[in-house]
Image: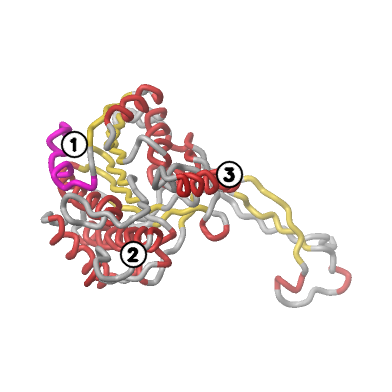
């Protein structure tokens, strides 16, 4: 029988099939003239990820830092709805209690200021027992260069050094998984181990933020390497939420910066992921059988929006030697050890 089309099927669980025409030249070689009908490929299309993929998380105990707003709030809400016992680790405990009451489920609120090492060191004493998953989600952007009570640059402290110390202190009590929220901003950063706090070099809001997220990415790389080398049952992953319509850009109440925030927020509300979509890469790490050390981002162009997908990272963020140096720096600054 003369073929009128060639079908190529990709088989996968719960996948739908879409039809697309391709010129025969794309498949290589020439077919006899009488067979030169359009070639139709049946292309498998994975269904969009949804929080239903989490299944029933009853009995799972999960810490989410920065769970009062933005991606952290979306993450904690989805986990609570899936039945997990969610610990909201937040700086503003009163707001945390309001958020917990609104999301329902099994939740508790524990105060944590990642910009203050005394608060970080006290956190393990404020919770009982072990946890299944630690999600280091909290992040901050500041308008001006600020230093913490420990003398650290504020964004580096909140986004990396505080979570690093928290993870080291809790690691013996984590049963299965650590998820660190990074950012595509890491691609624009350079590593300056001799001036990580930008005391001598020029400080800019987005430059300092990008550098703090590069440090998160490199810590995550070394954390994964050590866990695998030790044969640990704990796995570590990195994520980025894309561009999310949240309050992260609200860095000041000054008229100018408030106007800038409103402008960015208005654009994000139309063009960016909402907080539930921003939480999806983190939740994807819990629901899907992805490799240890994976970096999960979003599917859209330039990593701005879309559903969760495995993605690549910058060359520097794949440098194991430099990552070990970043961890050594963080150990010195926080006086905690990544003991694995």
Q: Residue at x 15, y 33 (%)?
A: 126
Position of residue 326 measured from the top left corner of the image (x, y, whole percent): 23, 65
The stretch of residues the image draws in magenta is 114-130
| Number of numbered discs visible in the structure rendering | 3
- The answer, for residue 322, to whether it is visible in the render is yes
| Name of the residue lying farthest toward the right | 34
Q: Nearer the viewer, residue 143 or 155?
A: 143
Q: Earlier in the sequence, mark 2 or mark 1?
A: 1
**Colour setting:** secondary structure
150 sits left or right of 80 in the view? left
Q: Nearer the viewer, residue 58 or 126?
A: 126
In the picture, which quadrant includes the C terminus? bottom left
Tell me the residue that label 3 is attached to.
47
Q: Residue at x 11, y 56 (%)?
A: 335
User: Alpha-carbon distance for marks 2 and 1?
Assistant: 39 Å
Task: Choose mark 2 or mark 3, whichever is in front.
Answer: 2
In the rendered image, which quarter is residue 38 located in? bottom right
Q: Earlier in the sequence, mark 2 or mark 3?
A: 3
Position of residue 210 measured from the top left corner of the image (x, y, whole percent): 38, 61
SS class, disc 1: loop
Q: Earlier in the sequence, mark 1 or mark 3?
A: 3
SS class, disc 3: loop
| Name of the residue lying farthest toward the bottom | 29
Position of residue 75 measured from the top left corner of the image (x, y, whole percent): 40, 38
SS class, disc 2: loop
Specify whether residue 193 is painted magenta: no
Tell me the residue that label 1 is attached to.
130
> Dot 1: few (<14), some (14–19), or many (≥20) neighbours within 10 Å?
some
142 sits left or right of 244 in the view? left
Tell me the residue that label 2 is attached to.
203
């Amino acid at each position: 029988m003369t073929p009128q089309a060639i079908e190529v099927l990709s088989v996968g669980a719960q996948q739908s099939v879409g039809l697309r025409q391709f010129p025969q030249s794309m498949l290589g070689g020439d077919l006899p003239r009488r067979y030169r009908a359009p070639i139709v490929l049946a292309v498998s299309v994975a269904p969009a990820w949804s929080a239903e993929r989490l299944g029933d998380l009853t009995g799972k105990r999960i810490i989410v830092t920065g769970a009062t707003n933005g991606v952290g709030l979306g993450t904690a809400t989805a986990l609570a709805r899936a039945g997990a016992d969610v610990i909201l680790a937040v700086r503003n405990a009163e707001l945390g209690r309001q958020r917990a009451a609104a999301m329902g489920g099994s939740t508790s609120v524990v105060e944590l200021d990642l910009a203050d090492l005394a608060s970080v060191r006290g956190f393990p004493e404020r919770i009982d027992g072990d946890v299944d998953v630690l999600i280091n989600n909290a992040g901050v952007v500041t308008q001006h260069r600020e230093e913490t009570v420990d003398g650290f640059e504020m964004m580096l402290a909140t986004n990396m050094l505080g979570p690093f110390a928290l993870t080291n202190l809790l690691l013996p009590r984590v049963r299965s998984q650590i998820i660190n929220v990074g950012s595509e901003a890491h691609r624009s950063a350079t590593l300056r181990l001799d001036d990580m706090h930008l005391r001598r070099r020029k400080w800019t809001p987005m430059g300092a933020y990008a550098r703090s997220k590069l440090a998160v990415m490199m810590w995550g790389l070394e954390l994964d390497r050590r866990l695998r080398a030790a044969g640990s049952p704990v796995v570590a992953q990195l994520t980025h939420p894309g561009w999310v319509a949240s309050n992260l850009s609200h860095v000041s109440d000054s008229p100018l910066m408030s106007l800038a925030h409103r402008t960015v927020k208005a654009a994000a509300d139309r063009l960016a992921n909402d907080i539930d979509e921003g939480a999806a890469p983190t939740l994807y790490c819990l629901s899907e059988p992805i490799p240890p050390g994976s970096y999960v981002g979003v599917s859209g162009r330039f990593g701005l929006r879309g559903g969760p997908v495995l993605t690549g990272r910058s060359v520097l963020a794949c440098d194991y030697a430099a990552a070990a140096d970043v961890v050594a720096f963080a150990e010195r600054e926080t006086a905690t050890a990544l003991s694995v």
